Amino acid sequence: MADLEMLQSFESLVQQLYRDDTSNATRSEVERQLSVFGTNPDTLDQSRFILERSQNPYAQHLAATSMMKIFTTHWARFSNQQRLEIRNNILSFLASNGPGLPGFVVIALVNLLCRITKLGWFDTPEHCDIVKEVSQFLSASIDHCIIGLQIFNDLVAEMNVNKTGQSLSMHRKKSVSFRDRSLLHLFQLSLQTMSQLVSGAMGAISPPQDGRLREQALKLSLSCLSYDFIGTSIDESTEDVGTVQIPTSWRPIIEDESTLSVLMQAYSTSPPPLSAQAMECVSQLASVRRSLFPTVESRQNFLSRLIASVLAILRTRQGLSDEGNFHEFCRVLARIKSNFQLSEIIKFEGYSELISQIATFTVQSLRSGATVSNSVFYILQLWSRMVTSVAYLRGEGESMLERYVPEVTQTYIASKVTAARAALEANPQDDPMEDEEMLVDQLDSASPLCRYQYEGTAHFLLSLMDPAIAKLLALGGGGAQPPERVEVVEGELAWMIYIVGAVVGARGTSRSSDEHELLDGDLSARVFQTLQWLEMRQSLPGATASATLQRLELAVLYFFQYFRKAYVGEQANVGSTHIFTRLGERCGVGDLMTVLGVIMNKTMSNLKTWCRHEEIVEKSLALLNELASGYSSGKALLKLDVVLYALQHHGPQSFPFLAQSGNSRHRTTFYTTLTRILLTDDNGPLELDVYMAPFSPLVQNLSALLSNPMILSTPGAARDEAKMLLIGFLRDLRGVVLGIVNRRSYSMFFDWIYPDYLPLLGRAAEIWWNDSDVTTPLLKFMGELVHNKCQRILFECSSPNGILLFREASALLVAYGRRILSGAPNTYKDKYKGVAASLATLTRALGGGYVNFGVFGLYGDSALTDALDVVLQLSLSIPLTELMAYPKVMKAYFSFQEILCHNHTAYLCRLSSQAFFQIMGNIQHGLKCTNPPHDMTVSSECASALYHIVEFHFRPSKREAPAHAALEAHLQANPRLMGALLGLLMESVIYDECPNQWALSRPMLGLILTGPDAYEAIKQQMVEAAPAESKASMVGAFDRLMAGGQRNLESRNRDKFTQNLTTFRHEAKTLLSP
């Protein structure tokens, strides 16, 4: 009776949950009441009762999903008998009621069944027999057959992806076991079902049933072929298939002619999108590893059948009018060349017809204009790979590519120009360049084609560019506002410049000759000539609002980047000067320095003219940074007048983009690059104090504003002005400090900023402590200032600068931290982001090696303890769940704990018990982060922190007697703490993937030596967990773990233990594995 009342109550709640007229408040309350079914394992029987007795499909669905959550989270709570009983009940329920259930209920039940199977795969043999039991569905009715295939599909997905939170090693064991035991059989079942469908052997079947059955069969075939056979975790965010690592046991079915035949019949007889799915299966089949075939003859036979199938479609164009089919067919073409050598393709008997058909297909597709960009990428990739393979042919046949590649290349270029023209004529604000990342991928594939028979392609490009440039220059010479049609020409020219950039940049990927360099010079000269038009256009009113002009500017920057890689960068082969000779003839830039001058003048001009266009500013700065990063190019920049001017006049007056709020982050990049250029040559034309001179008026103004209490106490324009000045100043200075990498420059910068300006930062923290727009750049600047990268912070032995630097950092952290602790909301922006920056700053200061921290205690200076107290309180004020939820905060916290435990262990031990145990609890949680998606450095830092605590405990000293006594008191208050940590480390080493085993092993020896009783208990527990026949071996493994060791923590003894642990881990994994 109680169960029936519970069922009625549950169904009533579900009705309220899914009714349209339910208020948000009521729905939230209902969700809260129902959530217990997915969290409390004691409700499993109730969910099972609801599933079996309810007639409400929503109640059934919610019961099934709740059971899956319970099993996933609390699997160990249930016995093998309970698990099998529920699994069998679900199978029976699907067999008896499945065809009549709504689809979403069937999906929930199938998911639950497969989750139980995955979790219990090694528990009992019955779970491994799932394929045999579900196969009975296939021999029943059509609807049962559909459900059976649906189960198989979900089972493959469940076994292929780790959805249960198990360790990666356990997931791979189950995945491999399923692969070896069942996957081939499932693939055969899918092919068998599809063969019956295309041959009509299924008997009487309705069109909806036929569609659903085809869908499930094709989906199963694709899932089997896409399985992660060897644990490579293929990136599904990319469209590239990669090599399919088919097991050797699959060879007969892959070599069987009927396999490919069935899939091609499925393509020809299925409507879209099922036909596209069939073609995707063919794509996977074309990607099987070459080593699967035992002989060259068998591989050639497989390739011949594959090409014959492709050629049949090329002849008739069957199904290619559908976008999905077209896309997958292009992938098949690309995969054939990717997986097979050109010499093997040429051996195909109908190769001449094949290459002709592919060329015709490509040209027609490009001319149609309806081809999607992703599909174009695969077509270009096919031709590009064939072209690059020609050099490896050794008289094995004629590729005939020289007949077709020029037409393909020119058609591609012309199609893009035509598409750009059409789009711009319809609406000049449209972007015919599409997504630039996708465009770059296309151009990278097209550039080898262009350079294959370069002369013809270059002349074709010149024939398109010359009229466009001449038309623009003629229009600009008139001095009037250009007509609207000029925007169309600009859009076309932008596309041409993109392709020129890609072609010139591909110089290093193909065989280059003097003639090719001259052609590069001809094409590049046209781009440099375009700069004249840009200067004319920008002088006209409203020019910066033109979308086509913006795209043309971006195209020129793209060309500069690729030209730099080919002829300016460190990797460029500049032994030949033919390109500069041609550039001198065509446009007067006849040497590298002149070219660099043109590029830098244009880059600096962009930072002034396009200050409101963030993308142009960003890409201009990226180009400047790339040029400055090279040793030779960086020194060359220092000789240019435009660069010297920028180094002496770099304020907002000279570079207006610095005054735009949207470019605030780019300020740091700009000053990092300028500083890097300045410091490229120690004997350069400018000293650092001259470079810093433009900052002096700004910081003096800022100092006056910060010292005026009347201005800062009243909100208004003056306070806002001071705030914006401060933010910009901090971002600029951080960029300067980022660019400093040597001792001399750092000392000069420190002398400039201290003592005149650095104390202002503490005052700023006191005023704007609750404004993250100020505190974020403030703390980041200080964090960079105290960062001793490249050992740049190295003052004279008699200099107090290291101590003074730390005192200023401490003052800032204390001023900020104490106020934040008093009342900042617990949000990432308002508190956690600042806490992470504070942790990073103090971590860098403590680990910099330029401060003798003993001085502070010796002379009664509280700067060190104040900073430690405040920053530690800040870190402990963040709940553990929030700490782990934000990766930046988590990394900063554990890095701080590692340096604290390493260098200031006594301070840590003297903390209150509450703070000490909170820190140890966080370290214990961090030790569990050993497997993806966790960052391995977190567990390594936690292990290092724990090692230093254990070492401090193991090696008492008279000088730190009070700290040792405090540590003993903490451990007596929680005597199980160290044993729990040792047990956790032992489990991680044995059961987890544990790529950082060395780091985790460091604290283990100390824990064993300081807690022998806990070690014996863990040893006994693991011996008991081993199978009866392995218990003696397990005892022997533990004995060998400590063999040859001594009771000390010397490096030789630790290394010996680490070696023993590696052997122990291997033995224990073998003995404890199911």
Image (cartoon, rainbow, N blue to C red):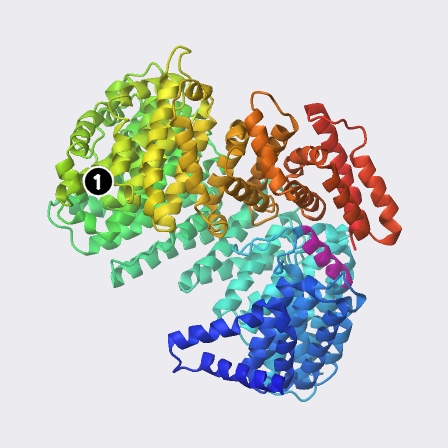
Outermost residue, top direction?
A: 798
- Quadrant of the image occupied by residue 134: bottom right
Is 853 on the left or on the right of 482, as rendered? Answer: right
Magenta part mainly helix, strand or loop?
helix
Asked whether residue 488 is in view, the answer is: yes
Secondary structure under tag 1 reads: helix
Residue depicted at 38% across the width and 74% down the height: 24
> Where is residue 196 shown, x and y percent of the image?
70, 79
Residue depicted at 41% across the width and 77% down the height: 26
Residue ID for mark 1: 724
Image: 1026 above or below 625: below
Examine the structure image and report whether residue 674 is included in the region drawn in magenta: no
Residue depicted at 25% across the width and 61% down the height: 427
- Near-viewer residue (514 or 441): 441
> Where is residue 43 shown, x and y percent of the image?
62, 73
* Quadrant showing the N terminus: bottom right
Image: 511 above or below 792: below
Image: 414 above or below 924: below
- Near-viewer residue (597 or 128): 128
Give the residues drawn in magenta, as a range: 169-181
Residue depicted at 74% across the width and 40% down the height: 1013
- Near-viewer residue (880 or 218): 880
